[in-house]
Amino acid sequence: MAEYEHLYDDMELFYEELEIMRVSGTMNMYGAPKWLEDNYDLSRKEAVYVFLAWCDFKEEEQEKLLTC
């Protein structure tokens, strides 16, 4: 979405941070958007966009694993 184009350069960093949180189990992932807001100074809408994009990425990753 063009509205969030300014975030694209940082998506890899966001995905890495979210994956670290997921694997470590330090946080319920439903709290991740608030964490993104607090740690990266994102608006609520931006944080939710990043989180949902990461969720879609993880779903696609899982689907690829299942079709191999």
Image (spheres, helix red, strand yellow):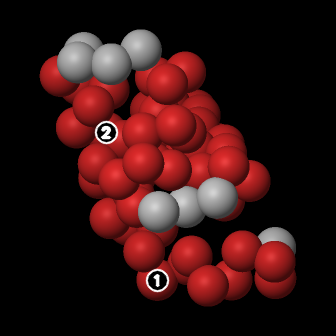
Indicate the secondary structure of the residue bearing disc 1.
helix
Residue 57 versus residue 18: which sits nearer the camera? 18
Q: Type of residue at label 2? A: Glu
Total of numbered circles in the picture? 2
User: Between 28 and 19, which is closer to the camera in this rendering?
Assistant: 28
Is 59 left or right of 9, judged from the image as shown? right
Among numbered discs 2 and 1, the one appearing first in the sequence: 1
The vertical placement of 42 against 3, above or below, is above
What residue would you read off at disc 1?
9
Of residues 53 and 34, the one nearer the viewer is 34
Residue 49 visible here: no
> On the rendered structure, is 11 left or right of 2?
left
Residue 19's disc is: 2
The amino acid marked with disc number 1 is Asp
| Residue at x 47% of width, y 63% of height | 41
| Relative to 7, residue 39 above or below | above
Residue at image position (55%, 61%) is 42
Which residue of the protein is positioned furthest toward the left in this rendering?
24
